[in-house]
Amino acid sequence: MIPPDSAKYLAVREAIAAPLRGSGYGYIETPGFENVELFARGVGESTDIVTKEMYAFETKGGDRLALRPEGTASVLRAALEANLHKAGNLPVKLWYSGSYYRYERPQKGRYRHFSQVGAEAIGAEDPALDAELIILADQAYRSLGLRDFRILLNSLGDQECRPVYRAALQDFLRGLDLDEDTLRRAEINPLRVLDDKREAVQKQLTGAPLLRDYLCDACKAYHEEVRELITAAGVSFEDDPKLVRGLDYYTRTTFEFVHDGLGSQSAVGGGGRYDGLSEMIGGPALPSVGWALGVDRTVLALEAEGVELELPPTASVFAVPLGEEARRVLFAKVTELRKNGVAADFSYGGKGLKAAMKAANRSGARYALVLGERDLAEGVVQLKDMESGEQSAVGVNEIVAELESRLA
């Protein structure tokens, strides 16, 4: 990522993070690599992420490490180690931003090195928390100007009702014409077969039993409350009984954000509830919910909709000195402007007026300051409005106040 395009990625990260910061979520940063075992136990031995896509390596000391393929397991591990759940204020609400790595076939929207912003609410079982996270993600996308995304929603049940469904699904899958790997996956985690993107598999899944028909009363009531809270907030969603996220730790609420302008890689983010993950990685029972939104794919979605983000210029003021004394005076004024919160840049390298004004144009600055020998003698600096072309002389000692006033 390089300028100027990198400014889009920063704006997307900021827009996704802003609703979280205003809702009690604190920032957490985890290492770029973790013990392989964390993902094998948490994400799931049978998932494509662990079996095919994880970058794993052995250190000189013999430790087996992996570049993190997702954020939730790392964040939960860090929260447990720091005993955040014992501070007496549950849920622990955390947000993060960073790079993740999966060994996949590179294509548009699917990269081996990608960026996500995520949020996790750890230690509370409450439909309002699930709804909050879905609403905050919707708010973030809409603040960017995105409109053509859809929210898919489903429930994956819990430890009471899912085993019954699991057995029914396995019976169904055993009667299909599936390859060895898929049959093996069906025995380990049959829900993962529903997530298989191959057309030959999807065709055979017509008529497969649906989890919603096996939900226990508690899961039905929980899911209905999530739906009601989201609806009351004015957030549209689609019930998708076949939605299965590609990670083993999800329970109950699961959701995905999709954008139809991205082709086959239509998911721009997703998440759900993971009530048993803490115990899977050696912690206490801590029901939790979270999501991760893809920065790269969100940028692609914005481009697909033709949304142009209003990005601030790198500088509001560009200073052009002509001569050594002018250079010293203007550099001091630029430093003062920056201290007062005004974005300002400077013509470095002793450029002539023509070249320096071209640089001022390219910077996107609203105003240019031009100071020559005659101006110095008169104690003024030329202030040029780069939009209107109007130019006026302003006292050197008044220029900072004048610019602050104009830019306010």
Image (spheres, rainbow, N blue to C red):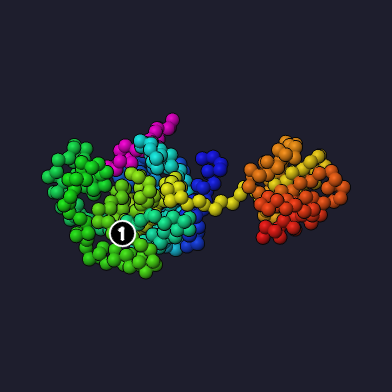
Residue 402: image x %, image y %? 74, 58
Question: Which is nearer the eye, 202 or 95?
Answer: 202
52 in magenta = yes
- Snapshot quadrant of residue 147: bottom left
Residue at 31 percent across and 47 percent down: it is 246
Residue 403: image x %, image y %? 72, 56
Residue 38: image x %, image y %? 36, 44
Residue at 73 percent across and 37 percent down: it is 351
Start-end of magenta stretch: 45-67
Residue at 22 percent across and 66 percent down: it is 217
Question: Which is nearer the eye, 314 or 285?
Answer: 314
Residue 167 located left or right of residue 240: left
Q: Is residue 189 visible?
A: no
Q: Is residue 359 above or below residue 406?
A: above
The residue singled out by tag 1 in the image is 238
88 in magenta = no
